[in-house]
Every structure is written in C-alpha cells, then in structure tokens.
Image (cartoon, grey):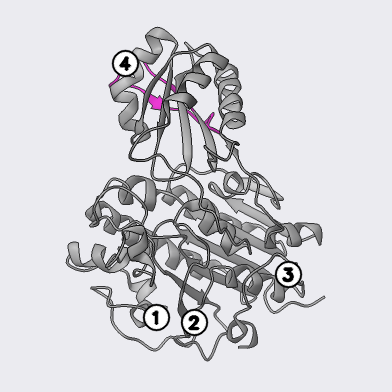
Amino acid sequence: MQYRFKRVFVIVMDSLGIGAMADAERFGDAGTNTFVHISQRNHGLNIPTLNSLGLRDLDEVLGTTKVAHPQSYVMKLNESSNGKDTMTGHWEMMGILTTKPFKTFTDTGFPAELIRELEEKTGHKVIGNYASSGTEILKELGEQQKRDNSLIVYTSADSVLQIAAHEETTPVKELYRCCEIAREICNRPEYLLGRIIARPFIGADAATFKRTPNRHDLALSPTGTTSMDILKKNGFTTSCVGKISDIFNGAGVTETTKTVSNIDGMNKTIAIAKDKDFIGLCFVNLVEFDSEYGHRRDPIGYAKAIETFDGQLKELLGVINEDDLIMVTADHGNDPTHTGTDHTREKVPLLVYNPRFQHGKLLEERTSFADIGVTVLKNFKLRKTANHIGQAIDEVLKD
C-alpha cells in the first residue's frame, strides 16, 4: 500500500510554548510567551533553520524574519485538555482529552499522611519532600541518604514523585520496590500523580554524586486508545526517542531509544533517519529545554539550547527522504522569565516540513494538539477511535 508519507518524525521541543492561551490567567500564566521572551532576553536568536521554516509567521521571535517557505506549513496549536504538564500535552498529541488535571505538589511538598505511609510500608525514613532539581538535591541531601539508608523524596512542576538513593547503600532493586509502593499509594484520587521515578545515584560525596542510567519510571497508562496504539495494532512502527515510552507507560510503543540530553536525542534521531527503513512514527522528546532551562528560569541557557537544536535540525532535514514528514512542536510552555518554576499554559508551535511541498504557508490556529496524531493516522489510512479528539491537517496531506 502506498502512503503519502512513509516515515513521520514528531519532535517535541519540551516546554517551548509560543504565547499564552486564552485561559492562561486561570493558571496564573497571563502574558507568558516562552519563545518570544527567551529571544528578547537573549537579544535575538540565531536560528536560521527554524527561520527558514517560517517561525516568524507565528510570532515576533527576535532574530527571525518573514520569509517564503513553500516546503513548510506553520501554525499554532491550542491545548484542549485541562492542564499544562508533560503527560497531558503528549497524551493529547496522540488523541487523549484530559479533563481532570494530574495533581502537583510543587509549592507544598507531599502531604504528611502520604510520607508517613511511605515510610511505614518501605521501612525507610523519608528526607527532602520539596520541589528541587534532581542534581541539586543530591548535593544537599545525598550524603545524608548514603549514610542513613533513607529515601530522598522530591517533586517538580510536573505531576511526579521522585525517589533518589545511592546504589551502594540502597540497592537498585530495593529502590524499585519502594517506588512500586509509592506508585500504589499515589494511584488514589487524593494523590493521583502521573509518574513515580526511581533516581539511583553513585559517587563518594556531594561533589561527585551523579545519577546513573538505572532510572525507572512508573507512569499511569493513557486513559484511552492513542494514535500510537492504533499504529502498533495495525503493524506500523512506533519508535520512541527519549522519555516518550515512559510518558505513555509503554502503551503503543514498538521500540524505544533512551537519551541523556537534547544533543544525544537529536543525534539518535538523525541516526534513525539515516539508517532505519520503517513505515510509521518516530516520536521524539527533547527534555532538557524544560528540565535544565525552563524550570531553572535560565533564559540564556535556554536560548543556547534552541540555537544548538536549530543546527541539528538542519542536519536532520538534510538526511531525510522525499517521503518523510517532519513535525516540530512542543507540549506546553515554561517561560523562564515568568515567576515561580512551574510550566506555563501556552499555545505551541507546529512546523511541518517535506522537501516536496510546494504550497507551504501559515495556517489558522488549531484547537487541539491531537491534530498531530490524527494527521499521522490519516496518512496511514487509519481511523481514530471514539475516544479520540482532533482533526487531520488536510493541507499537509494534500500538498
């Protein structure tokens, strides 16, 4: 069977929103614009590849210019779901509408009752219990954990409970057991969390502690059938790069490639584009935009990461085939010039490229991230299920 596109690459620039949604004030995010404010704080961005795809049509990103871009369609996507977290955004891309947002405990830490039950059931004392960078909390509490065989519990702006422990003091198998207990506790409605993450580390002291590759996520499964589920059921590849498989709890995934950074994620995506002949979806998450720069309120570091990505995107576009489709987007905002450290309720960009396009232009705003997944399904002549939201972007499939 012939398809308009044989391989579709969906690349998520995690948290790179492009303007507050109409309801942003309800989330405390009025006036936010991750992309534009980063460009302003950096006195412009050097991003010729994104510029050539038509980014300036979406907003006044400093350093970009209006250009003709017949090989790319650009548009903004609004989020239909009620939330601004990673799981909600990615699930919506694949057709899931989330009406009840996952719980977060960024400002308060986890309730005393939850911590007490976790201590009783695991047999370990809990230390920490506040929002923190994973590397910073190791500097603060790692030596205490290593000495006492306690558990470092912390969270972030996402709906997540993370547990860190030294591999020599608390073996990885034991840490996983504790995380399974936490997952069971946090399945209850009063605590409902998207993910529990085991964060083992090694090192002699605070100066040398580092996290190991033995991270393990225990996520909730999507609440309905996703576009990836449909692709997999019908024999198509769903190749996931970065934390995509964790976000979907493995549902709909045929293969996964772990990454350690944005650069590593793009290098592995480029390698897939060069070397792997498949029919289906390659779904990529580049988490460092969010974890290293958005949450840490570092607009200059964020700007450099965007510029680095732009160079790697150029390399990717240079190795794809004429029957490949590239879709570059985001899952929410995280304006590093905004107050606090939380995600921001924003529209996201969508830039869609194929070297054979002839009529690329700015399209009207879309009402849902789910239009991405539905477009992928329609390309492969598949139908969405009853729970699916979203409409295919027909201009992309007809050019």
Horizontal and vertical percent position of residue 85: 46, 53
Say whether residue 365 is magenta: no
Horizontal and vertical percent position of residue 343: 37, 53
To which quarter of the image does residue 43 belong?
bottom left
Q: Residue tagged by mark 4?
A: 205
Give the Cα separation between the discs numbered 1 and 3.
Answer: 30 Å
Indicate which disc, 1 or 2, sits on the residue closer to the N terminus: 1
- Please, is residue 383 above or below residue 211 in the view? below
Q: Which mark is residue 180?
A: none
Q: Which mark is residue 384?
A: 3
Looking at numbered disc 3 in the image, what kind of residue is underneath it? Answer: Lys
Give the Cα separation between the discs numbered 4 and 3.
Answer: 52 Å
The answer to which of 79 and 335 lies nearer the viewer is: 79
Looking at numbered disc 2 in the image, what kind of residue is underneath it? Answer: Tyr
Looking at numbered disc 4 in the image, what kind of residue is underneath it? Answer: Asp
Q: Residue tagged by mark 2?
A: 73
Indicate which disc, 3 or 2, sits on the residue closer to the N terminus: 2
Q: Residue tagged by mark 1?
A: 54
The answer to which of 315 and 303 lies nearer the viewer is: 303
